[in-house]
Image (cartoon, coloured by chain):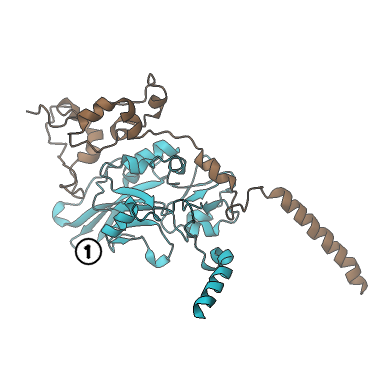
Amino acid sequence: MAAAGTLLLTSAVKPFQMLLIASEQPPEEGPWWGIGIDITKCIGCGMCARGCKMENDVPDEPFYFRTWVEQYTILNNGEVLIESPNGSIDGFSQPVAEEEIFKTFFVPKLCNHCAKSPCTQVCPVGATFESPDGVALIDEKYCIGCAYCVQACPYGCRYIHPEKKVADKCTLCYHRLKQGIDPVCMEICPTKARIYGDLKDRDGELVKFLRDHDYQVLKPHLNTGSKLFYNALTAEIS
Amino acid sequence: MPPQLKRLIPLFVVFIGLFLIVRHLLIPDSFGQYGHYRGIALEEIASKEMNVANKAMCVDCHYEVQEIIENDVHADLSCIICHGAGLEHVDNPEAGNIQKIGTRELCGSCHELNPARPMDIIFQVDLSTHNPEFENCSDCHHPHQVWEGIQ
C-alpha cells in the first residue's frame, strides 16, 4: 500500500520535480558531467589558467578567470594565508620563511557546475542554465549583464566580460566536450590533478576517483549540489 | 450585470489579449525547450571555435617525437604545455604559432622550488642558484630527453 502510494506520488511529482526540489536531475540518456580534483597532485604551475585563457577568449587582465589556482599557507600559529597572484599564471612565490610554515599546498578552482546551482536560479531572464548533461552555461545573446548571478555564485566563479558586457564563466569547454575532446585545463595539467567524467558511468574515471579517495565539495553547508569533488579538501579551504 | 462590469470585462479581455500576443512575439521560439532558457543556446555554445589543440592531434603527425619521449620523465605531458596552443599549426602546418623555448620562466612554472610542491610529485630546483652561467634550461636539458648527456 505504502509502495503503491509512493509510486503514485513520485510519478505525479515528476513534472514538477525541478520546481519542488529545485535540483537538476541526471538525464535518462547521455552523460552527467562532473569534475574531480586531487589537491595532493596540484603543483601550482598555472598551466590550467593559461590554457583556459587561450582557448576561451578570457581577457588577459588579472581579475578575469574561468579557472585559477590558490596557494594556501598554514603557519605554525594556525593563521591561514591565501594567495592567487594573477590566478597562478605568473607563478607563485613564498614570502614566508620555511620554518614558520606548518603546511602549504595548492587548490585549483573552477565552476562547480552545481546541480542545485544558486547562479542559475537567480537569473531574471533565463540566460543561464544547467544543460541537460549537467554543465552550467550562459546564453550570451540573452544575458542582460545585471550581474545577479555573479553575486549569487558562492564560489566566485563568474565575472562580467569587460567587452561583451555579459556574464561569463567556465563552460567545461562545452564546445570541446561535445566533440569528445577534453577541456583544455584537464588536457594541459601535467600531473593530471584535474579530471572530469560521467557521474553515471560506474566504470568511468571519475566514479573510480570518487571510490578511491575521500571526496568533499566546497562549502557543503550551502547545499549547492556541487559536482566538483576534491580529494584531500581540508577545513581551511573554502 | 452592473454597468461597471460591462465596461471593465471587455477592457480586461483586450489588454490581456494584447499582452499575450506581444509575449508570443517577443519570447524566442526555442525558449522552454529543455528548461527556462533558449534551447538553441546549447548548439550555439557547442559550436564555438577551438583555439587549442590536444596531444592526440600532435602525435598524429609527430609520432616520432612520441617514440622518443615515451621513455622520458616528461612522457605523460601534453605537448601544448610547452609548445603552445598549436591549433593553427594543425590546420596549416606551414603556419607558425608553435613555440620551442626552454627558458627558465617556462620550465620554472613547474620546476621552481616551492614548499607547496611535493618533491615526490615534481622534481624541483632553486633556479636562482642552479647553474646560473647557462641562460636557458634547454642549454643542458633537452625537454624530450631530460637526463641525456648531462655532465
Query: Looking at the picture, how far across and down is residue A132, in whole percent?
Result: 51, 53
Q: Where is residue B14 in the image (x, y as percent from the top left)?
A: 84, 59
Q: In which quarter of the image is the N terminus of chain B?
A: bottom right
Query: Measuring 24% from the left and 61% from the top, which residue is drawn there?
Result: A79
Amino acid under label 1? Gly
Label 1: how many Cα within 10 Å (few below 14, some 14–19, many 20+): few
* Residue at image location 53% in from the left, 53% down from the top: A129
**Residue at (77%, 53%) from the top-left corner?**
B21
Please name the residue that numbered disc 1 is placed on. Answer: A78
Could you tell me residue A116's position as x and y percent?
A: 47, 61
Q: Is residue A41 visible?
A: yes
Q: Where in the figure is residue A8, as x and y percent of width and height?
A: 56, 73
Chain painted in brown in the figure: B
Residue, far top: B94
Q: Residue at x 58, y 66 (%)?
A: A16
Q: The cyan chain is which one?
A: A
